[in-house]
Image: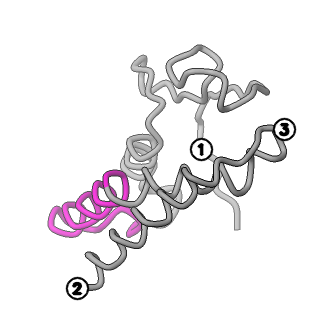
Amino acid sequence: MGCHLPLWYCVYPFNFYSVPTNSPYFLVLNFDDIINSESRAICRYVCEKYIDKGNRGLYGTNTLAKASIDQWLEAEGQSFNPSTSTLVFQLAFASRMKIKQDQGLIKQSEGKLAKVLMEESA
């Protein structure tokens, strides 16, 4: 099942970790003449703007459901993303980019993630 949306975008090849996210080469979406590169905001926008083109309940079907989804997106962005993004880079991409893995940073990020997971399960 496909979903075709009338979105204009460009993809440029670049080294993700050497280009600042506010550079013109970073993935962005033009929201009715407003440029946005924040992935969670892009997801919300697409879900709302094109609700009739796909899964209608993906971003919630009422304001309470949407608020709950926003709460979890915010929790992910603030709690999980800092440690997991470091781990993903160090464990999956550093060696491919011929960068030595920083074992201290890996251990530190694992500790931060373990703390977050323990808080979430309590």
> In the rendered view, does 16 fall on the left or right side of 50?
right
Tell me where residue 106 sits by quadrant. Answer: bottom right
Is the residue marked by circle 1 packed among few (<14), some (14-19), or many (20+) residues within 10 Å? few
Tell me where residue 119 sits by quadrant. Answer: bottom left
Relative image position of residue 58 (x, y in whole percent) = 42, 66
User: Mark 1 or mark 3: which comes first in sequence?
Assistant: 1
Give the magenta part as a residue range: 56-78
Residue at the disc numbered 2: 122
Q: Amino acid at mark 1?
A: Leu
SS class of the residue under badge 1? loop
| Marks 1 and 3, how far apart at CA | 38 Å
Quarter of the figure that contains the N terminus = bottom right
Q: Determine the residue positioned at 45% across, 56% down.
A: 52
Q: Determine the residue positioned at 76% across, 42% down.
A: 100
Residue at the disc numbered 1: 5
Instruction: Point out which mark residue 98 bears.
Output: 3
Residue 79 lies within the magenta run: no
Farthest residue to the left: give it: 64
User: Mark 1 or mark 2: which comes first in sequence?
Assistant: 1
> In the rendered view, does 41 fall on the left or right side of 66?
right
Quarter of the figure that contains the C terminus = bottom left
Is the residue marked by circle 2 packed among few (<14), some (14-19), or many (20+) residues within 10 Å? few
Q: Determine the residue positioned at 16% across, 62% down.
A: 63
The dominant secondary structure in magenta is: helix
| Marks 1 and 2, how far apart at CA | 41 Å
Is the residue marked by circle 3 packed among few (<14), some (14-19), or many (20+) residues within 10 Å? few
Q: Is residue 50 visible?
A: yes
Q: Is residue 89 visible?
A: no
SS class of the residue under badge 3? loop
Relative image position of residue 34 (x, y in whole percent) = 39, 20
Relative image position of residue 57 (x, y in whole percent) = 38, 69
Relative image position of residue 48 (x, y in whole percent) = 36, 49
